[in-house]
Image (spheres, grey):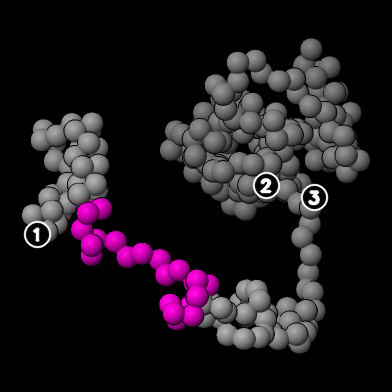
Amino acid sequence: MNSILFSTRRLFAPAQPGLLSAGQQVSARRSVMSALANVPTAYKKAKRVGRGPSSGKGKTSGRGMNGQKQKESVHPWFEGGQTPLHKTLPKIGFTNTFAQDIVKLNLGRLQEWIDKGRIDPRQPITMKDLLDSRACRGIKDGVKLLADGKENFKTPINITVSRASKEAIKCIEELGGTVTTKYYNRLGLRALLRPEYFSTLPLEARPIRRRDIEYYKNAGVRGYLSTFQSGDQKATA
């Protein structure tokens, strides 16, 4: 008996490299398990119920005569038939199914990344550049450009994001830069951020919700569907 227990400790201990191969370890453990099956104290058998009064667990199987617990199981949250606590409390708030997980990017952080050389201001800046430089992390539905730290921002840039505040747009355009807000659905945004995951890049989706169409047609936020952007493209051409 002691020799069997000693061998089990050795075989179920962490494997040491160079002693046994994986196949040899499996076969050795199987032989030990079969040896343990012949040891009376190695396993504890389950108690059989409902097999006669001589066992002590016959007839009602140890559950008693009557009651709910004798007939079926009772959920831990059951309160005996009274109104449950979660039904006595009022519902507060709601979940907005149209809410978007927008990552916020401030001008102060953007200028800091430019000063460190992590973003090249001479090239057009997209959300992929922001993700690759770690200026933004965990982009799910887009990036919104905000004006916090605008007093330190001093570099003209050309940037394309999902949304932008009017103060951030004003600050960048005063320095000679441009801001474009562009719509991306989940698939299009993933293709922009991780193009290596696609064998063929999907076509760019157009906004279909009314609020998205109205936003990206608004020249005040420099939407890419607005007349402001189309006029700039004609002037550039």
**In this picture, residue 135 sits left or right of residue 140:** left
Q: Categorize mark 2 by other alpha carbons within 10 Å: few (<14), some (14-19), many (20+).
A: some
Q: Work out whether mark 1 precedes mark 2 in sequence or the reverse, and give the earlier one.
A: 1
Distance from disc 2 to disc 3, alpha carbons, whole Å, reads 12 Å
Whether residue 116 appears in this view of the structure is yes
**In this picture, residue 111 sits left or right of residue 204:** left
Quadrant containing the C terminus in the rendered view: top right
Going by the numbered disc 1, the residue's amino acid type is Asn
Give the secondary structure at mark 2. loop
Going by the numbered disc 3, the residue's amino acid type is Phe
> What span is in magenta?
36-57
Q: For residue 37: magenta? A: yes
Residue nearer the viewer, 45 or 76: 45
Quadrant containing the N terminus in the rendered view: bottom left
Distance from disc 3 to disc 1, alpha carbons, whole Å, reads 66 Å
* Residue 98: mark: 3
Give the secondary structure at mark 3. loop
Distance from disc 1 to disc 2, alpha carbons, whole Å, reads 64 Å
Relative to 28, does residue 129 appear above or below in the rendering? above
Quickly name the residue at label 2: 102
**In this picture, residue 2 sits left or right of residue 226:** left
Give the secondary structure at mark 1. helix
Quickly name the residue at label 1: 2
